[in-house]
Image: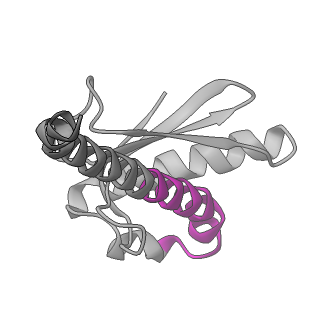
Amino acid sequence: MQNNIRKYAGTIFILIIAAGFAWWSGRVESSVANHVQEEAVRLVPLFHNDPTIINDIVTNPIIQPTLADSLTAVFLKSAEQGGHFEVIVTEGDDTVYGDGSATHVAVFKVNTETVAGLRIICFTDTDPLLITGAWIK
């Protein structure tokens, strides 16, 4: 009996360590996605109050007009519907608009209708969002 315990102790130890890493990794990625979602929700009213904020959050100035149009579309469409919108965040880049550089995609919806989307780079739950792409539906 003692031999069987020793025989499998290493394997059991490795499985416990692997499970711990899997749990920790999932928890960290979930907190980053929540951070991205919270910041994306805040972005619409912040932009409406001060459109110059997008100057500091884009990776390339060429996307500023599209980002501005996207955030304006979300604001106006949500204002028509009582000011409510939701942001759905997924990990990875967009398969249609992306080039693989984004860590997350935030899709803005008003009454289940997709209004706009953002390709975002954010690695930790304390990083600021960097917008690397935007589109309007």
Disc count in the image?
0
For residue 83, side relative to residue 13 (left or right): right
Residue 20 pos. (x, y %): 34, 52
What range of the chain is rendered magenta? 30-51
Q: Is residue 35 above or below residue 109?
A: below
Verify whether residue 130 appears in magenta. Answer: no
Farthest-out residue, front:
1
Farthest-out residue, right:
82
Q: Is residue 24 above or below residue 108?
A: below
Figure quadrant of residue 123: bottom left
Given residues 88 and 58, the one toward you in this image is 88
Point 29% across, 39% down: residue: 92
Verify whether residue 48 appears in magenta. Answer: yes
For residue 104, side relative to residue 111 (left or right): left
Residue 2 pos. (x, y %): 21, 41
For the N terminus, the quadrant is top left
For residue 88, side relative to residue 135 (left or right): right
Colouring chosen for the image of the structure = one colour
For residue 90, side relative to residue 75 (left or right): left
Given residues 33 and 86, the one toward you in this image is 33
Point 64% across, 73% down: residue: 49
Magenta region's main secondary structure?
helix
Point 58% across, 51% down: residue: 72
Residue 71 pos. (x, y %): 54, 52
